[in-house]
Image: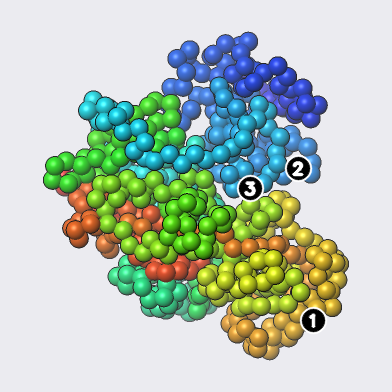
């Protein structure tokens, strides 16, 4: 095992070699590079990986090169570091650094690092149907179960991890299956907050809110096509979900406002850090502390049922262990949506063809496919949401909380053109109507200081800065006099408490503290409102209207909660609340059966 000093020496030598372009001369991949040391320099034996998590292999990487933090500390200054990461869970070096094939910059599935990686190939996502290898799948099913558990949870995002913790607390044996090499799903990317009403943090801040107001806001935002019973579950359980997360160790004490809300109810960590990565890490830690079996690189390709239509387990495609069957009494589908699959998005909304997406690379619709193949009904698939503030430069979503904390949107003429905290569909349409089909998110140093999440955007080098409004305008190529006029007018609205241009209700601060900042933003596909139909207990409804015994679903893979348009902050509330319900109900079903 390498000592800390040895790690730094090896790391410094490797980085030096990378900068000189010689560190991997004569080798095509990592296996070649380490070949002189034999297979056991990476693997536990000469038989290769012992599990789909590559637990031993990743441990070998860390023992030599150090943790992500240590690697980041050794990098040259000025670069955008993929090792300064929002990823949760155990370190998965092999997500990028492959052994017997070209390595890839997995992070570039979302970002635009332009990072030089040893033995590099091009990262790309191949959309392979879940039933593409039917003959081999049928053979694996015929061979019978390899193992048995009470509950299988498909997906390791917030909904899946919440379900896992809830099911384990109910006494169930649980296996979580995640097809990506890293856990967390879209949850680890979420930044704004978690909507909840009548909470302890609101009370401490003197915020008066009612669950009925949250219900009304959610129904209005969804154009009143939401399933009202599901919306009631969302709102009426929201404060309990905050308490539950807090009991697990989460900090949800900062409360702001996001588009479409009548009251400040968007809960996030103190100082305004990104809520998603925090919640995902808390749930991951809780699941691990409960000895939950979590498997990465494990794609579920079929939900299995008996002749009566009751769930009996799943067929898994392990990236390294191949096909195998897990027998289970209940299955929770928590795979998220399909925003990263633009062909499918365009099928339901042709206007979004060719759009970028804010989602993680695994959000392709696998869960929807396996659920519908097992007889699940669907609802609201035609409703797909674009998030208005995606950075085309950094390949990252800029959280709505920046606007909620006081930022404004201006076009290339330096003028405001929309109520910044309107619903996402209206804000996106307004941006697309501007010259260049993009706009600038403009804020000052007081906004930056109010929200620590902004520092991540600075690190990604997507933030333009000016010591004065004129300097910033000159950098952006917009008329300085017009931008100064816009900011002055807006500050006047803040003082008077009334936005006479666009009727923005919440204007938390003047933009008067230099320096000034701007981020170019444009809409990108963000959330798929439709999905599997569920009832208030997260049970999946079949195509004939009957419940599918043993199948549950939670989170973005489901439809009905958000209607035609999701309000910012309702997604985290959705995944935690319905994830908890799904896990508890699945555990109860398994116990009773």
Q: Please tell me in which quadrant of the rendered image residue 172 appears.
A: top left
Task: Return the x and y of residue 176 as percentages of the image width and height.
Answer: 37, 40
Is 450 left or right of 350, judged from the image as shown?
Answer: right
Decide which of 203, 433 is in the foreground and name it: 433
What residue sits 43% from the left and 57% below the top?
Answer: 347
Residue linked to disc 3: 111
Is 288 left or right of 118, judged from the image as shown?
Answer: left
Q: Secondary structure at mark 1?
A: helix
Q: Please tell me in which quadrant of the rendered image residue 422 appears.
A: bottom right
For the residues labelled 2 and 1, the Cα–Cα distance comes to 36 Å
Q: Quadrant of the C terminus?
A: top left
**Mark 2 or mark 1, which has the lower sequence index?**
2
Mark 3 or 2: in front is 3
Residue linked to disc 1: 485
Residue most extreme to the left: 308
Q: Secondary structure at mark 3?
A: loop
Task: Return the x and y of residue 76 as percentages of the image width and height.
Answer: 78, 37
Q: Quadrant of the N terminus?
A: top right
What residue sits 24% from the left and 40% below the top?
Answer: 304
Mark 2 or 1: in front is 1
Classify 10 Å Cα crowding around label 1: few (below 14), some (14-19), many (20 and above).
few
Task: Return the x and y of residue 492 as percentages of the image width and height.
Answer: 73, 86
Classify 10 Å Cα crowding around label 2: few (below 14), some (14-19), many (20 and above).
few
């Amino acid at each position: 095992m390498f000592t800390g000093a040895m790690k730094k020496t090896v790391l410094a030598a490797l980085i030096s070699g990378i900068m000189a372009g010689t560190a991997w001369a004569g080798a095509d991949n990592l296996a070649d590079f380490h070949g002189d040391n034999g297979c056991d320099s990476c693997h536990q034996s000469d038989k290769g990986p012992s599990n789909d998590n590559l637990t031993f292999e990743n441990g070998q990487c860390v023992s030599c090169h150090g943790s992500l933090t240590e690697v980041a500390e050794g990098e040259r200054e000025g670069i955008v570091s993929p090792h300064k990461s929002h990823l949760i869970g155990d370190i998965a070096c092999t997500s990028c650094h492959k052994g017997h094939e070209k390595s890839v910059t997995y992070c570039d599935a979302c970002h635009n690092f332009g990072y030089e990686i040893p033995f590099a190939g091009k990262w790309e996502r191949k959309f392979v149907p879940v039933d593409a290898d039917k003959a081999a799948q049928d053979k694996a099913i015929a061979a019978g179960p390899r193992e048995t558990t009470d509950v299988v949870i498909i997906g390791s995002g917030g909904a899946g991890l919440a379900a896992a913790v809830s099911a384990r607390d109910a006494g169930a044996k649980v296996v979580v299956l995640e097809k990506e090499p890293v856990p967390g799903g879209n949850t680890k990317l979420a930044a704004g907050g978690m909507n909840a009403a009548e909470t302890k943090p609101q009370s401490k801040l003197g915020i008066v809110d009612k669950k009925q107001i949250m219900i009304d806001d959610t129904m209005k935002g969804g154009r009143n096509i939401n399933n009202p019973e599901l919306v009631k579950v969302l709102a009426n359980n929201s404060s309990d979900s905050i308490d539950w997360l807090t009991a697990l160790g989460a900090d949800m004490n900062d409360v702001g406002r996001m588009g479409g809300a009548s009251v400040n109810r968007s809960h996030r960590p103190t100082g305004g850090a990104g809520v998603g990565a925090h919640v995902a890490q808390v749930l991951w830690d809780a699941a691990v502390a409960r000895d939950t079996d979590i498997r990465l690189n494990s794609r579920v390709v079929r939900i299995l049922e008996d002749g009566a239509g009751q769930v009996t387990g799943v067929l898994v495609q392990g990236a390294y262990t191949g096909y195998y069957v897990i027998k289970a009494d209940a299955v929770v589908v928590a795979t998220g949506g399909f925003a990263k699959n633009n062909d499918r998005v365009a099928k339901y909304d042709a206007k979004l063809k060719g759009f970028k997406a804010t989602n993680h690379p695994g959000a392709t619709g696998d869960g929807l496919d396996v659920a519908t193949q097992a007889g699940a009904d669907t609802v609201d698939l035609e409703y797909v949401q674009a998030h208005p503030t995606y950075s085309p430069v950094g390949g990252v979503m800029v959280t709505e909380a920046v606007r909620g904390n006081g930022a404004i949107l201006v076009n290339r003429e330096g003028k405001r053109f929309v109520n910044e905290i309107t619903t996402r569909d209206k804000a996106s349409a307004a941006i697309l109507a501007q010259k260049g089909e993009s706009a600038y998110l403009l804020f000052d140093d007081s906004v930056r200081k109010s929200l620590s999440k902004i520092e991540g955007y600075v690190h990604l080098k997507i933030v333009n800065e000016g010591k004065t409004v004129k300097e910033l305008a000159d950098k952006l190529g917009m008329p300085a006099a017009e931008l100064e006029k816009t900011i002055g007018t807006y500050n006047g609205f803040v003082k008077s408490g009334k936005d006479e241009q666009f009727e923005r209700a919440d204007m938390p601060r003047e933009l008067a503290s230099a320096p000034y900042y701007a981020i170019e933003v444009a809409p990108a596909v963000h959330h798929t409102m439709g999905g599997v139909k569920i009832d208030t207990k997260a049970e999946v409804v079949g195509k004939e209207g009957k419940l599918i015994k043993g199948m549950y679903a939670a989170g973005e893979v489901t439809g009905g909660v958000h209607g035609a348009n999701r309000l910012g902050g309702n997604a985290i509330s959705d995944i935690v609340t319905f994830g908890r319900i799904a896990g508890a109900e699945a555990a109860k079903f398994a116990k009773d059966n």
